[in-house]
Amino acid sequence: GQNIDQPTEMTATEGAIVQINCTYQTSGFNGLFWYQQHAGEAPTFLSYNVLDGLEEKGRFSSFLSRSKGYSYLLLKELQMKDSASYLCAVRDGDYKLSFGAGTTVTVRA
Amino acid sequence: GAVVSQHPSWVICKSGTSVKIECRSLDFQATTMFWYRQFPKQSLMLMATSNEGSKATYEQGVEKDKFLINHASLTLSTLTVTSAHPEDSSFYICSASHLTGGDVQPQHFGDGTRLSIL
């Protein structure tokens, strides 16, 4: 099975930058994914990494170090609408996704 | 982008009823579809993996006779919760992925089905 850890919650101010860390232990690895989930809604795909390094997509960036079993999601220029749960998920050798418990980000004005 | 449609979005029914949930990939052929369940304030838990034309693979602890999965085509998978009871009340979400250039693309999720059993 997978063991995926991420902080439970984070709070930041509008316009600031937030970094959500994720560590994992996995049997087989086929990518690490970040999803955003608003309360009562399904997850929305944000970013993914298969190789080490940084992937940038607008205000969101994700970083991966496979040797360290570590990833982070960087949210820049925070907006109120970014208040949500952010899920770190690892795809294993069978292409199944295992999710972390999620990090609830609260953006304050 | 990849679009996954899930229907219905909300179901309220009596205990003992069977409920069918549909998951469709609208603009791509889904080689694999996944069914998840999410309880309040918890993360998504994979229930089963569904490949077109073959039997679904269920995760440990998930009763295959209670949660019937059919993946009849590359664009449609269904989950039937048979003889549902209040403890089956949850948020059920499907996802689909496909191959592009030999690489399996990220999973895209349907909007989810909130099931409430009275």
Image: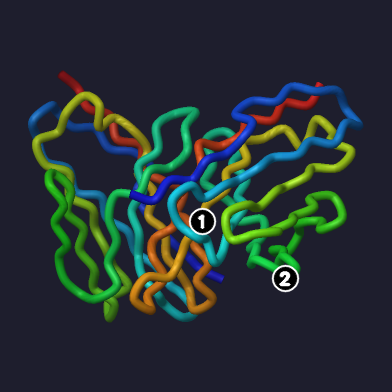
Residue ID at (25%, 32%): A82
Among the 4 quarters of the image, the one containing residue A24: bottom left
Residue ID at (12%, 47%): A58
Tell which subunit mark 1 falls on: B
Nearer to me, A98 or B113: B113
Residue A15 in the image: state x and y as whole percent.
8, 30
Amino acid on which disc 1 is placed: Ala
Question: Which residue position holds label 1?
Answer: B96
Which mark is drawn over residue B54? 2
Is B94 rendered above or below residue B6? Answer: below
Q: Secondary structure at mark 2?
A: loop
Residue ID at (57%, 47%): B24
Q: Residues within 10 Å of mark 1 (few under 14, many from 20)?
A: many
Give me the C-alpha separation between circle 1 and circle 2. 16 Å
In the rendered view, does B88 fall on the left or right side of B17? left
Residue B84 in the image: state x and y as whole percent.
84, 36
Tell which subunit mark 2 falls on: B
Residue A47 in the image: state x and y as whole percent.
27, 55
Which mark is drawn over residue B43? none
Is B41 rendered above or below residue B13? Answer: below
